[in-house]
Amino acid sequence: MEPNKKVSIAVLCMDYRFWPDTLPLLEEKYGEFDLIEIAGGSKSLVLPLEPEDRITLLENISISIKLHHAERIILTNHIDCGAYGGSTKFKTHDKELAFHKEELEKAEMVIEKKFPELEVVKLIIYKNDKDEIKLIEV
Ligand SMILES: [Zn+2]
């Protein structure tokens, strides 16, 4: 491992439309990471579908820190996420982006409280007109 290289934890939604093309982009930008996939991604930190989801997610983060010395967490949400009711819930694309930005900020606060040692990166994942996966750091 290079001295400057941080191990990350990436929290992603299980949605097959997004994760396969997202993983290589994350690896390219952030290097090695432990992967936690759960419906809704970072939603489980803020408004879990089931209370156990939040506990499991926090436990997985703890394990990654203990075993792999993770120093960074990449919190992601994606556009048209079914766990949030999909894109149709929002009047415009910008409103959907703004909503996810706020949700990621709430998730960041949970992480800062529980794991203050972790650097937090917040990303919104979307597909452009050419159906390519893009990441917006917020
Ligand atoms: Zn989703």
Image (tube, grey):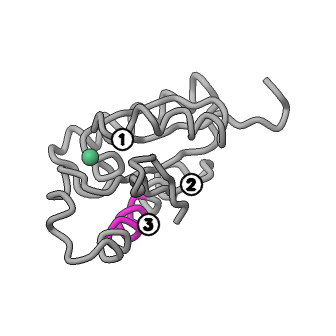
Q: Residue 79: where, in percent of width, then height?
A: 32, 57
Q: Is residue 100 magenta?
A: yes
Q: How far apart are the alpha carbons under marks 2 and 1?
A: 18 Å
Query: The N terminus lies in which quarter of the figure?
Result: top right
Q: Which mark is residue 105?
A: 3
x, y percent for residue 6:
71, 37
Q: Earlier in the sequence, mark 2 or mark 1?
A: 1
Per the rendering, the mark at residue 121 is 2
For disc 1, the neighbor class at 10 Å (few under 14, some 14 to 19, many from 20) is: many
Return the disc, 1 or 3, that comes first in the chain's sequence.
1
Ligand 1 under 8 Å from disc 2 Cβ:
no
Please give the label number shown on residue 43. Answer: none
Q: Quadrant of residue 16?
A: top left
Label 3 SS: helix
Label 3 amino acid?
A: Glu
**Mark 1 CB near ligand 1 (8 Å cut):** yes
- Circles 2, 1 touching at the beta carbon (< 8 Å): no
57 sits to left or right of 39? right
- The residue that disc 1 covers is 18
**Residue 29 at what x, y percent from top left?**
66, 42
The kind of secondary structure the magenta stretch mainly shows is: helix
